[in-house]
Image (cartoon, helix red, strand yellow):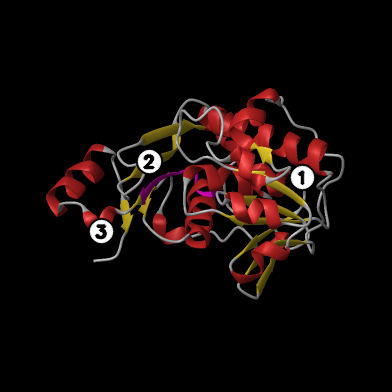
Amino acid sequence: MNPPMTGSGSPSDPTFPTDLLARLVASDSGRPRLTWYDDSPGPTHGERIELSARVLTNWVAKGANLLQDDCAAGPGTTVGLDLPAHWRAVYWALATWSVGATVVLGEPVGDADVLVTIDPEAAAAHGGDAILVALPALARSHPEAAAAGGAIDEAKELLTHGDQFSPMADPEPDDLALSADGHDTPYADLIVPQPVWGEAPRVAVDAGLGSLLATSLSAWAADGSVVALRGSAGIDPDTLTRRLDAEGVTLPLLAP
């Protein structure tokens, strides 16, 4: 029998994001856990991406291996995510937590030891390791990689890393997991259960990256899944309603 997903453990034995991923794979490795719709203007407009627990875990492992092997990231390292609320940002956050490092969001992102960004100029100007991300699902290289100095071209390099990950060191419960606009969260408090969501909720969310990450962790803690939307306010309400119905959403966390 698979262990129940009850969210955070006791303060002395908390659930970490890596624990959640392992439980999702054990529960049902093929069930969609993150579904992504992009309705925002730009090169990814119209994309729909669906990641099962197994596929999500593979993306996370590749990112974690890149961070650990190429950037020497581990507990005590800060990783700035200069990314929009996007499915790629989710696996980079999980990869950061897999190596035991700290995700940095918001104003101090450029001061992080490692910068993960979509901006070639920011990558080139960063004093430490930088990873340049191309958002389109089928990207095989970033079109402006040459302008990013010595930054790692994620689209070109990530797939060369392994699908399995073994950390060199694990974080402690009191280690800093998330620093977002001056608010710090240790690993012990990162996953916040939401009992009112019920068991195995399918949660729709269109929000900033911090909210997307928090919602995803809470949903997964209840053996649930997430439908992440970007730019949904700009589409026809009837189209949005049909989409949520087709996806089996049980909890729409969307602005009216």
Sequence-earlier tag: 1 or 2? 2
What type is the residue that disc 3 sits on?
Answer: Ala
The outermost residue toward the left is 238
Left/right placement of residue 56 relative to residue 226 reads right
Q: Is 63 or 53 nearer to us in this picture?
A: 63
**On screen, residue 151 above or below 112:** above
Mark 1 in CB contact with mark 2 (< 8 angstroms): no
Determine which residue is flagged by label 3.
233
The outermost residue toward the bottom is 182
Helix, strand or loop at label 2? It is: loop
The outermost residue toward the right is 168
Q: Is 7 or 34 nearer to us in this picture?
A: 34
User: Which disc number belongs to residue 99?
Assistant: 1
Q: Which residue is painted at 34% across and 42% down in the image?
A: 37
What type is the residue that disc 2 sits on?
Answer: Pro
Q: In which quarter of the image is the N terminus?
A: top right
For marks 2 and 3, give the CA distance. Answer: 18 Å
Left/right placement of residue 240 relative to residue 63 reads left
Badge nearest the viewer, 1 or 2: 2
Q: Is residue 227 something that shows in the picture?
A: yes
For marks 1 and 3, give the CA distance. Answer: 35 Å
What type is the residue that disc 1 sits on?
Answer: Val
Residue numbers of the magenta segment: 221-229
Q: Quadrant of the C terminus?
A: bottom left
Residue 55: image quadrant is: top right
